[in-house]
Amino acid sequence: MLDIDLPAPAAAVRSVLANRGIVPALALLNDRTPYRFTAIYKLNGEVMHAAHAFDRTAEYRTWLKVVPLDRSFCQYAIEHGEFVTRHASEDQRLPRRPYAGFVESYYGQLLTRNGGMPYGTFIHFDLEPRSIEAAEIDFLREVIPTFLDYLD
C-alpha cells in the first residue's frame, strides 16, 4: 500500500489527502481495516452516487456507482449519523436488510455541510462479514470531516 511514515495517523491521512488526493487517502484508510471497499457516496435526491471509491482488489465495478437510497445501508448512516453492521444477513435491526447477502458488512458516517445539510456518506463495506474496532471508529470520526474540504 502507500508508504507513509508520519508521526500520527491523522496527520498521515491529512497529508495524503492534501498532496495526493481523495482516492489515495481512502486507500490509506482502507489499509487500516479488513474491508474490501472504502468510498465516499454523494446523496443526490433519492440516489447515492459513488463520488470516490477504493477497491482493495482493484476490481471496482459499475454496480457500486449508483445505489437507490432506500436500498442502501447509507440510509441508516444518514438517519442516525453513523451506522455499522458486521453481518447484514444476520442483523435483526435491519427490517428490510438492503443488499443483505450481497453487501454483508458496512460502516458508514454521515458527511454534512452548511449547518447540517447532508452531503453523503463515508463508508467501508465488504461482501463478506467484517468488523471494525471501536478505536478505528473514533479515529474515523476525527479525520473524515477533513474530506469535506476536498469534495465538490
Image (cartoon, rainbow, N blue to C red):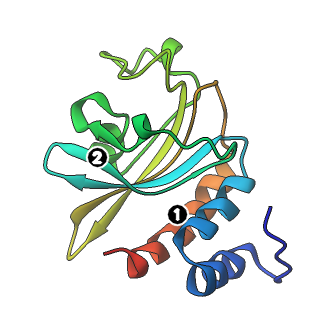
What quarter of the picture does the C terminus occupy? Answer: bottom left
What residue is rendered at 65% in x and 47% in y?
58
Residue 135 position (above or below residue 92)? below
The local crowd at label 2, few if under 14, some if 14 to 19, many if 20 or more residues have their Cα within 10 Å, is many
- Secondary structure beneath dot 1 equals helix
Instruction: Give the class, few, some or many, for how many residues have Cα within 10 Å of label 1's Cα (few <14, many ≥20).
Output: some
* Residue type beneath disc 2: Met
**What residue sits right under mark 1 in the picture?**
141
Q: Nearer the viewer, residue 82 or 6?
A: 6
Which of the image's four quarters has the N terminus? bottom right
Quadrant of residue 26 in the image? bottom right
Where residue 101 sits in the image (x, y, percent)?
50, 15
Number of callouts: 2
Mark 2 vs mark 1: in front: 2
Q: Residue at x 79, y 68 (%)?
A: 2
Q: Is residue 112 above or below residue 73?
A: below
Q: Residue furthest left?
A: 45
| Residue 82: image location, x then y, percent | 41, 48
Q: Is residue 77 above or below residue 24?
A: above
Q: Earlier in the sequence, mark 2 or mark 1?
A: 2
Q: Which residue is mark 2?
A: 48
Q: CA distance from mark 2 to mark 1?
A: 21 Å
Name which residue lies at 55% across and 43% down.
60
Instruction: Classify residue 35 by image quadrant.
Output: top right
Q: In this view of the protein, which residue sits in the foreground, 124 or 68?
A: 68
Say what secondary structure mark 2 lies in: strand
Q: Residue at x 61, y 69 (%)?
A: 25
Residue 133: image location, x then y, percent: 69, 45
Asked whether disc 2 touches disc 1, contact meaning CB atoms under 8 Å apart, the reply is: no
Image coordinates for residue 70, horizontal then vertical, percent: 22, 31
Quarter location, residue 68: top left
Q: Label 1 amino acid?
A: Arg
